[in-house]
Image: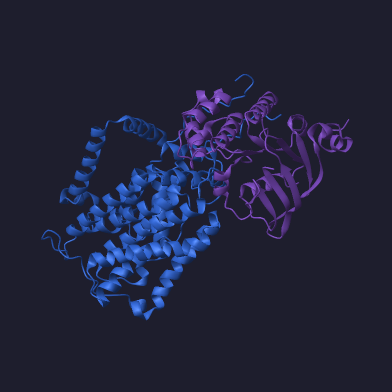
Amino acid sequence: MLLEVKDINVHYGKIAALKGISLEVNEGEIVSLIGANGAGKTTTLKTISGLRPLTSGKILFNGEDISKTPGHKRVIMGIGQAPEGRGVFPGMTVQENLLMGAYTRKDDLTKDLDEVYGLFPRLAERRSQFGGTMSGGEQQMIAIGRALMTKPKVVLLDEPSMGLAPMLIAQIFSIIKEINSRGTTVLLVEQNAQQALKLSDRAYVLETGRVVKSAPGKDLLNDPSVREAYLGGH
Amino acid sequence: MKGDEVTSEETTPRRNPFSAIGHGIDVMRDWWEHAKVWQRYLVYIGAVVFALILPAPAIGSFMSPGADWTSVLVYPIGTYILLAVGLNVVVGQAGLLDLGFVAFFAIGGYNVAYFGTQYHWNYWATVVMGIAMAAVSGVILGAPTLRLRGDYLAIVTLGFGEIVRITANNADVIGGARGITNVPHPPPIFGTKFLLDPAPYYYLMIVAIALVIIFSVRLQKSRVGRAWAAIREDEDAAELMGVPTFKFKLLAFAIGAMIGGLAGGVYAGKAVFIEPNTFPFILSATILAAVVLGGSGNLPGVILGAFLIGWLPERFRDFAEYRILIFGGVLVLMMALRPEGLLPSRRRKAELREGTGGMGAMGAEVAGPTTEASAEVNQ
């Protein structure tokens, strides 16, 4: 098992955001976390990548306990993340943004840059443009590309479809599939449950800081209660 | 790619008197970016020559009719520039809002005064001691507080500045409220004696400023500078790129503090007398104003800002008490019309437009002056 989250609790001040979440991600999978606003999806990702400290529980990566490891070291271990709201560096060019992703690496980067530009030809066209002047979709591409530049074993994607046009959403999801087929494990957080479930091997449904359901993505697509709550009824 | 709704972000021309200046700056910056090495060195040499002839009486009679121009160049102008370059490391490069920067200036000054008068150390040894002590106190201040962000950090640093001043006020070993008198001058260099004539101090100040500028530019272009830029623009994202953000923030604090300590040492070498009230909170605010006015993060801008902030009140001494009022008004007007500062870097402009705080620091997600509501197509 690549990533294992064991019964984690996370608090913002006195408010519990996660109340004993457990999940597993196997190598090569696409796993989704779906749920409403405030369910704890983003907090879960931030805790895995080390941006939030946990109150109790454990996070294992490759069998190693990383609960206390600072975030920047988890990146070196192989956890990459495209954060919520993209977090593109506005004053850096597209290329500089991507190179920031390789900050900890000292090996040759040309191959990886080419690969990212291959996935996102749009970024190649605009490599010397400031990140802050790019559109929402392009910034999402930067965020994903930048996460890939860290050479992650697992990449955490936080709402990659947020605020994008439907055509673009479809494109982003097909790229996620492509990334996965090239060997990177994906942990995806999405409000766009329909698309996410279609893509995922497995998925977890989060509600107010707890996992209420977990099953293969296809099963959840047909699950009446999930359809009711997250897929717009019928 | 097809179907991608790209928002074309044309820069709308600014309709205010500064737009022409802004255009001129852009032209200059383009030239500078493509300038050859020898052209750049010509500019550097020109800047040094300019600095060396600046104290000339012909210039002084216009710049400072009321007071001795060379003295004004040492304090406030030169000292402000040195402090502003130091604060720029913290505020402009790493994006941390420090409202207690004067504390490091005080620590540098007090070290020179204390070890010089009590133990009769060599002046340069006391300066080095001051720099080291400032760095140590930067780390002591930073270690517990740099987990805070934005305005919380600002409040803690403000408190630190006051603690240092009030401690100095109450510590008899460093003279308490009376301060320390007879602070020794620097020993002669190449036969030039440091006495009452301000000229040698001016040239010493120029050397200090030049060294600090070179150091600062080298840092900015290094891996450290890249890490600071990432932290300033998005701290969480920086951590996700593998940047040890806490360590680099601490480093920014320590380096800024060292430059502040150096400024204090140079200042004390000329001042003869220092007391706690030499280091009021308002000095921290003034230096911050210089950095922001000039263009936080851009060295030429910061130097220009510090020059203006140091020089203008001296130049307009005739207006007596009103000058501070006018000065404040001018600052407010400047920031309303040109919030990115007089000489912002292009990168800083892009950050501001995105609305990531600009200062990085206040943690405020304020829309920049030209930001329009994001034109992304929602599903």
Q: Residue at x 34, y 45 (%)?
A: B218
Relative horizontal placement of residue B290, taking residue B359 as reference (left or right): left
Between residues B121 and B307, which one lies in front from this camera angle? B121
Q: Residue at x 67, y 38 (%)?
A: A27
Which residue sits furthest left? B191
Relative horizontal placement of residue A232, taking residue A22 as reference (left or right): right
Which residue sits furthest top? B2
Between residues B30 and B366, which one lies in front from this camera angle? B30
Quadrant in which residue A79 is drawn: top right
Q: Check the picture and name the quadrant holding the N terminus of chain B.
A: top right
Between residues A97 and B106, which one lies in front from this camera angle? A97
**Relative to B77, is A170 above or below?**
above
**Relative to B351, is B151 above or below?**
below
Task: Identify the hue of chain A.
Answer: purple
Q: Which chain is blue?
A: B
Quadrant in which residue A160 is drawn: top right
Q: Residue at x 68, y 34 (%)?
A: A28
Quadrant in which residue B106 is drawn: bottom left
- Percent across and percent down for residue B152 are 55, 58
- Percent across and percent down for residue B351 are 50, 40
- Percent across and percent down for residue B365 are 57, 45
Between residues B158 and B54, which one lies in front from this camera angle? B158
**Relative to A178, is B54 above or below?**
below
Residue B145 can be seen, yes or no = yes
Q: Check the picture and name the quadrant holding the C terminus of chain B.
A: top right
- Percent across and percent down for residue A91 are 48, 38
